[in-house]
Image (tube, rainbow, N blue to C red):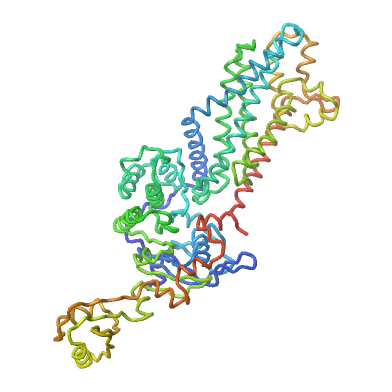
Amino acid sequence: MSATAAPPVARAAPPARGALADELVAIGVVWHRELLRFGRNRLRMVTSLVQPLLFLFVLGSGLSSMLPSSGGVDFRTFMFPGIIAMSVLFTSLFSALSIVWDREFGFLREMLVAPVHRGAIVLGKCAGGATIATIQGSVILLLAGAVHVPYAPELLLALLGFMVVTAVALTALGLLLASRMQQIESFMAVMNFVTLPMFFLAGAIFPPRGLPEWLSVLTKLDPLTYAVDPMRREVFAHVEASPALERTLSAGVRWGSWTVPIGVELAIVAAVGALSLVLAIKAFARAE
Amino acid sequence: MATPADAVVEVRDLVKRFGPLEAVRGISFDVAHGEAFGFIGPNGAGKSTTISILCTLLRPTSGTARVAGFDVVRDPLAVRRRIGLVFQDPTLDEYLTAEENLRFHARLYGVPRRQLARRLDEVLDMVELGDRRHHLVRTFSGGMKRRLEIARGLMHSPQVLFLDEPTIGLDPQTRSHIWSSIDELRAREQVTMFLTTHSMEEAERCDRVAIIDHGELVATGTPEALKETVGQDRIELHVDDPREALAELRARYGIAASRHDGEVAFQVARADEFAPRLLAELRTPTRAIHIARPTLDDVFMAYTGRTIRDAEASSAERRHSGTIARAWRGRR
């Protein structure tokens, strides 16, 4: 663009990095900010752990005392994967709230007017929220021993991997929901409408097989079902349980007579995440 | 004024319609390098719509706009890299420190890491917030936040800094502090400033102003030139002998003055230059002199038929919060 005369003072040359490098830096910067804010909010760190711990140790202990001794398996062992999923679910969707918050307090505009594509901002937000959710889930994971889940490295790694996939997918879903929300209040209302049904239908705290037919259809539509089930199957592969008990508590998700393999379940979660992400990016790109 | 060769903002026949509403009706103007250009007009006149188009936040319905040599529609990212923006509404992250806000911005705008530390010191120094750099922004006053936003807008050394109502909602002392920051950075950076305002005091500080009303530019020029177009300055002399003064004015300068009791009044082009000469030369003893200059308010009145305050009051739904924000969110 030689039409303009040279500016009178020396200016920093416009960045000469490649376009892709610019976008990656932008993702990193947005991600970093999410972690900075999270690290600064100790109260949020602590309070978001209270709920899963209550479910696991209060509700879980109460329920297990009601149930007949089930072949040596602690009921809380059964609940454990569900509680990890719960922690990831709530943290992921709550992280997406930050984009509504940013919109209400103006900071979103600072990001949207930057010389980067909107997609990079959304990806950075997603990466940040997913990282925080994975950290929260990992704290629950550390308590495995307290509910008789062994600290087997391959089990922990597998659960961590499942958590990452779940966290990314759910944060993306949250961002999609947040893309149209102008107010924190309406986001909170929608969140309650989304999180609790997702949580209860996913079989996180009871075996979904006991549900009536019409409800079991809903559980199969709940993406969280396909996040909880692989974790539970992985856990039951590492605890001593009679085959009969394992059939009752961790039989896998069935479509007709076909038991959906773990790989397919994870692919479903990933697909939900990818679709949400694409739609969320589109929604933010439209907001010119 | 600005020739295309040194224009940093070039606007040609710009039109923006929102449905049936024509917010901007074919305006054209240039802004030269290093200039402070003021866009004045009441709310709803189209100034925020125009600034949003120049900042690539809105697409024009027709017409072209180039900023720093790039077309705002075809090269929005190139334009964004070369402009700084200070909005009416705060857009800072209050839970980060001043420095963290600036670093976030610098990385997003691709400021090289080598230059980052020096640039941080420079901009914080310019707005006198160096000692608060590690404080959370939520502890800042309104004026400090605005200054920090100005510093942030400069982090990436833009060619043009857009300021949308930079001192709206601030008390007079804070206003003058903001303006001293702005003057300071103009002196140091020679950055082009494009600001919108409906304060005539603020407009007076600009090199050139454009008056926009109902989506059309009604006048463009230096504040001085605009004031000269609406009328001459008025000089009132308090003299002992009005009759003698009248005669002398007529004989010496060919001025037909009028007499009101002990006062003699007349109009002249540049009273500030004429008065010293007059006092030195006038034989008639003079006790007092009063000079009244046309104000930009008079200019606005002359071009639009109403005062800016009336225009403000009559503009429907005047929620002065976030006109850019509204244009940006609404995009109807």
Q: Which residue is drawn at 65% across and 43% down?
A: A278
| Rendering coords of residue A65 (x, y %) | 71, 9
Q: Nearer the viewer, residue B233 or A46?
A: B233
| Rendering coords of residue B268 (x, y %) | 28, 83
Residue B123 in the figure: left or right of residue A269: left
Q: Which residue is drawn at 44% across and 45% down?
A: B105
Q: Give the position of the N terminus of chain B as an image quadrant.
A: bottom left
Q: Which of B66 and A97 is in front in this view?
A: A97
Looking at the rendering, which quadrant does residue B270 occupy? bottom left
Residue B151 in the figure: left or right of residue A229: left
| Image: B71 above or below A184 | below
Q: Residue at x 53, y 68 (%)?
A: B314
| Image: A273 above or below A236 | below
Residue B58 in the figure: left or right of residue B128: right
| Rendering coords of residue B38 (x, y %) | 41, 65
Q: Give the position of the C terminus of chain B as an image quadrant.
A: bottom right
| Rendering coords of residue B80 (x, y %) | 48, 55
| Image: A166 above or below B278 | above
Q: How many marks?
A: 0
| Image: A73 above or below A263 | above
